[in-house]
């Protein structure tokens, strides 16, 4: 065992020996022109040797591993007990001798910094910054030994334990090394970020500096001078008095930082000291909070727009899901941080492209529009003439007058739905019994059929006709009658909306279960197990059969799953768990329907919406006829209302058809994964989720897999889950946040996008997982985003507030159909609104008031 390693002995392969901080210092000490104060690391071998001597440590770690991260009281008590035990243990003689020898080489009476260096610290995917302890000006062997033990114990501070719990790190597998480094007593010290920590721009570096030691700055106790550098130029500086650094010093420091960044391959957070005219680097770690930049192969400026914000799915996706979605979409997409982005710079380059894209996004997501306008105003995107090399707009621009040339015929919608159903049925028949390379080849070939159905020109015409008629109604009725968002009421209870029908169908399931008290009591126990354990699966359905009324309840749930079981939260990712795979996810919504509604509520709800729409139509037409040219205006408006009611519901169907097809693929692929597990190729079935579809095809063909690649991708996915994707990101890494630029909301109101008219006041229920939802009648649902899987909760909600969304995204469409006042795109809504607060949602004007 090596209990001590000098920096000169440490390289990139020594993470397990000396932790992240120690490994980086070893790497830095080997770089030409980078000055690192001398030192050594007390290794993880020494830590393990000492931990083995700590009384009852195994029992204490067992207790700690079973504590939930939110149980702070238990964590505080257990972690304090472990720290006391570690600090009190005797240091073995051979470890003491190794430390004494290293000190003698460097100077035993010198002053040292003693810093923790955990094996899960300063990693590319998790910095653990500030989680363990550091000590300065430590002199003498006895003091250093004491502070080494204190660093070991700091592995079990309350904040470190909670951080590990929340980021999936095993307490037993994280080990602690300790850095012992000669102190530098500098003229100035501080921090260098090689990417702007506020905007994430990789071409902008920021430097913070104070006189003397930088510990107070690093700890946040003082603020220093601040300098911003781009292209070897100081572009801004803020100093309270005489500047701590000259511009020449700042530029030289940033150049050192760029070399360090290039060496480690990621933007860095660097602690430095300036002694005389020499910079010393005392620490460097990756900046883990930056969202990754999509890869490009040129030096052009690129503007990336989030696909997830359009699809109501901002969670990270696994590689299999990413690859299938990219094969499905006709538009080239870029990956970053487990998300997908479209580069719109070529579209923004031409006047026609700019007008089409910015105009359309202005209607659907003003925050994206404003961010793009900010970049256009800066001149970030090159300009090309119309008719040049710029492509057509990404999204057709809304028509200012007449809608798309398609007859208002509901039979068109019926025909499209039947074609999609027939195609999925054929897929189910043809995929049966396929295995091995034949199965993968079949799926890859069938994606062409998926795209044929999904992008049928008639289907696109129907969707655009419904959207354009909605826009026409809102624009003209506000102009003629001062009526805002009139189409919201007119679109209630339209036909062929598979997503809203899905929510109402769950009310029918509740009707089948409500009369059977034993079944209801049993489902409450299932819901509790879901809350406690996270997932129940489908075993409870078989248990139902033994209860009075249980067979009827089971059959009702299974019938619902036959129709909608391919859906789930984040459903565009094929790897996400479907309702058919975990029906217990629906139990809280079913119980909520039993509690909040009377029998027959589904049919009544639909009819009420239809009648309200008809009443609104008659009211508007009557008012229009009293205007100049009123008959003509009323006739035009009636045509548009008919188009909305004929076509608006169909907008939800293509995605339903696509997800139905995805689930057939997934079931077949999981059967193949079971074969690969049985043959020893894969360790677990879900290993296939961390392979792209073409990679999985190769694994199936060769019966050979790169297990290390799968492990790396699992770790990367965990890190991506912690990131928040931006709406708009540039090729420089800058996150461009748009603003609503409105002044019509009351002071203190949370501003968003109005997507469903009306005003409602009620209790806010902040929900992050629909399987944990517990809504009462009159509650307002507040969440990050809603895709179609959230629709069952809409029937109980009185209003909706989301952080992500647009005018024509699924949550907005269903909110309008159900008549729920809704405001979407309210940034940080789930943080700014507390569960249980009373709020008022202004769905017509687009803001939320917090009342109490």
Image: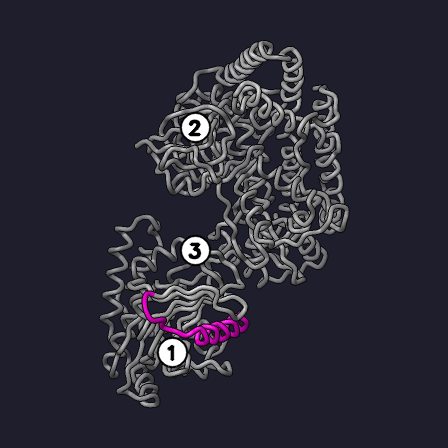
Residue 60 appears anywhere in the view: yes
- Under circle 2, the secondary element is strand
Is 418 on the left or on the right of 116, as rendered?
right
Residue 720 lies, with reference to residue 833, above or below; the image says below
Mark 3 vs 2, N-terminal side: 3
Q: Can you tell which quarter of the image residue 193 is in?
A: bottom left
The structure's colour scheme is one colour
| Residue 77, percent from left and from top | 24, 55
Is 68 on the left or on the right of 321, as rendered?
left
Q: Disc 3, disc 1: CB below 8 Å?
A: no
| Residue 674, percent from left and from top | 61, 49
Q: Of 187 and 549, which appears nearest the observer? A: 187
The N terminus, quarter of image = bottom left
Residue 505 lies, with reference to residue 217, above or below; the image says above
Is 538 on the left or on the right of 282, as rendered?
right
For image coordinates 49% across by 15% down, the residue present is: 600
Q: For the residues marked 1 and 2, what is the alpha-carbon distance in whole angstroms?
A: 56 Å
Q: Of 652 and 696, which appears nearest the observer? A: 652
Residue denoted by label 2: 842
For image coordinates 59% across by 62% down, the residue present is: 709
Magenta span of residues: 240-264
The crowd level at tag 1 (other Cα within 10 Å; few <14, some 14-19, many 20+) is many
Q: Can you tell which quarter of the image residue 171 is in?
A: bottom left
> Of discs 3 and 2, which sits in the foreground?
2
| Residue 266, percent from left and from top | 52, 66
Q: Does the magenta stretch include residue 343?
A: no
Residue 552 appears anywhere in the view: no
**On residue 274, which mark appears?**
1
């Amino acid at each position: 065992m090596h209990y001590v390693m000098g920096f000169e002995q440490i390289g990139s392969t020594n993470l397990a020996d000396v932790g992240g901080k120690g490994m980086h210092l070893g790497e830095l000490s080997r770089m030409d022109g980078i000055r690192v104060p001398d030192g050594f690391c007390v290794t993880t071998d020494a830590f393990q040797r000492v931990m083995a001597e700590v009384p009852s440590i195994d029992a204490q770690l067992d207790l700690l591993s079973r504590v939930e991260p939110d149980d702070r009281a238990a964590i505080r008590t257990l972690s304090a007990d472990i720290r006391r035990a570690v600090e009190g243990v005797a240091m073995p003689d051979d470890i003491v001798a190794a430390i004494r020898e290293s000190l003698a080489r460097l100077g035993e009476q010198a002053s040292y910094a003693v810093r923790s260096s955990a094996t899960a610290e300063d990693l590319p995917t998790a910095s653990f910054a500030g989680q363990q302890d550091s000590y300065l000006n430590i002199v003498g062997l006895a003091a250093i030994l004491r502070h080494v033990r204190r660093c070991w114990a700091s592995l079990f501070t309350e904040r470190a334990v909670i951080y590990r719990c929340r980021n999936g790190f095993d307490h037993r597998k994280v080990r602690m090394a300790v850095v012992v480094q000669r102190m530098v007593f500098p003229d100035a010290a501080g921090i260098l970020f090689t990417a702007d920590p506020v905007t994430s721009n990789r071409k902008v570096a920021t430097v913070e500096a104070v006189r003397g030691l930088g510990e107070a700055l690093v700890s946040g106790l003082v603020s220093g001078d601040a300098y911003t550098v781009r292209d070897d130029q100081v572009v801004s500086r803020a100093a309270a008095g005489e500047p701590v650094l000259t511009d020449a010093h700042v530029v030289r420091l940033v150049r050192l930082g760029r070399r360090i960044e290039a060496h480690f391959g990621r933007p860095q957070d660097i602690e430095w000291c300036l002694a005389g005219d020499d910079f010393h680097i005392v620490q460097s770690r990756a900046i883990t909070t930056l969202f990754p930049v999509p890869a490009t192969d040129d030096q052009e400026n690129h503007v990336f727009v989030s696909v997830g914000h359009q699809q109501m799915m901002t969670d990270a996706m696994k590689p299999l899901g990413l690859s299938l979605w990219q094969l499905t979409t006709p538009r080239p997409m870029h990956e970053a941080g487990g998300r997908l982005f479209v580069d719109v710079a070529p579209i923004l380059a031409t006047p026609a492209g700019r007008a089409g894209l910015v105009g359309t996004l202005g209607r659907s997501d003003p925050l994206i529009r404003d961010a793009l306008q900010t970049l256009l105003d800066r001149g970030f995107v090159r300009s090309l003439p119309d008719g040049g090399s710029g492509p057509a707009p990404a999204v057709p621009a809304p028509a200012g007058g007449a809608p798309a040339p398609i007859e208002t015929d509901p039979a068109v919608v019926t025909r499209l739905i039947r074609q999609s159903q027939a195609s999925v049925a054929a897929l189910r028949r043809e995929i049966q019994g396929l295995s091995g390379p034949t199965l993968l080849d079949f799926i890859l070939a069938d994606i062409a059929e998926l795209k044929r159905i999904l992008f049928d020109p008639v289907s696109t015409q129907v969707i655009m006709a419904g959207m354009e008629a909605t826009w026409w109604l809102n624009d003209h009725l506000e102009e003629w009658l001062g009526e805002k968002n009139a189409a919201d009421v007119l679109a209630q209870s339209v036909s062929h909306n598979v997503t809203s029908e899905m929510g109402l169908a769950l009310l029918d399931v509740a009707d089948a279960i409500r009369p059977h008290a034993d079944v209801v009591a049993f489902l409450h126990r299932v819901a509790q197990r879901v809350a406690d354990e996270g997932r129940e699966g489908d075993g409870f359905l078989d248990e139902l059969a033994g209860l009075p009324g249980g067979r009827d309840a089971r059959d009702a749930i299974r019938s619902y799953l036959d129709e909608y079981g391919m859906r789930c939260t984040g459903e565009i990712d094929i790897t996400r768990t479907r309702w058919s795979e975990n029906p217990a996810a629906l139990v809280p919504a079913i119980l909520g329907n039993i509690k909040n509604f009377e029998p027959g509520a589904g049919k009544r709800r639909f009819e009420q919406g239809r009648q309200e729409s008809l009443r609104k139509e008659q009211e508007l037409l009557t008012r229009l006829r009293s205007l100049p040219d009123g008959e003509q205006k009323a006739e035009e408006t009636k045509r548009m209302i008919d188009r909305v009611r004929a076509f608006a519901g169909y907008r939800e169907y293509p995605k339903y058809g696509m997800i139905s097809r995805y689930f057939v693929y997934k079931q077949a692929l999981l059967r193949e994964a079971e074969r690969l597990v049985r043959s020893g190729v894969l360790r677990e079935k879900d290993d296939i989720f961390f392979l792209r579809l073409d990679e999985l095809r190769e694994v199936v063909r060769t019966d050979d897999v790169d297990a290390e690649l799968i492990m790396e991708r699992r770790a990367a996915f965990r890190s991506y889950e912690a990131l928040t994707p931006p709406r708009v990101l540039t090729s420089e890494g800058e996150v461009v946040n748009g603003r609503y630029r409105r002044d019509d909301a009351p002071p203190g109101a949370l501003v968003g996008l109005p997507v469903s008219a009306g005003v409602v006041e009620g209790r806010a229920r902040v929900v992050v997982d629909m399987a944990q939802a517990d809504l009462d009648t009159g509650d307002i649902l507040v969440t990050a985003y809603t895709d179609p899987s959230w629709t069952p909760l809409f029937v109980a909600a009185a209003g909706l507030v989301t952080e992500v969304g647009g005018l024509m995204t699924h949550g907005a469409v269903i909110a309008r159909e159900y008549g729920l006042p809704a405001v979407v795109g309210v940034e940080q809504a789930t943080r700014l609104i507390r569960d249980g607060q009373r709020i008022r949602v202004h769905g017509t004007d687009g803001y939320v008031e917090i009342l109490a």
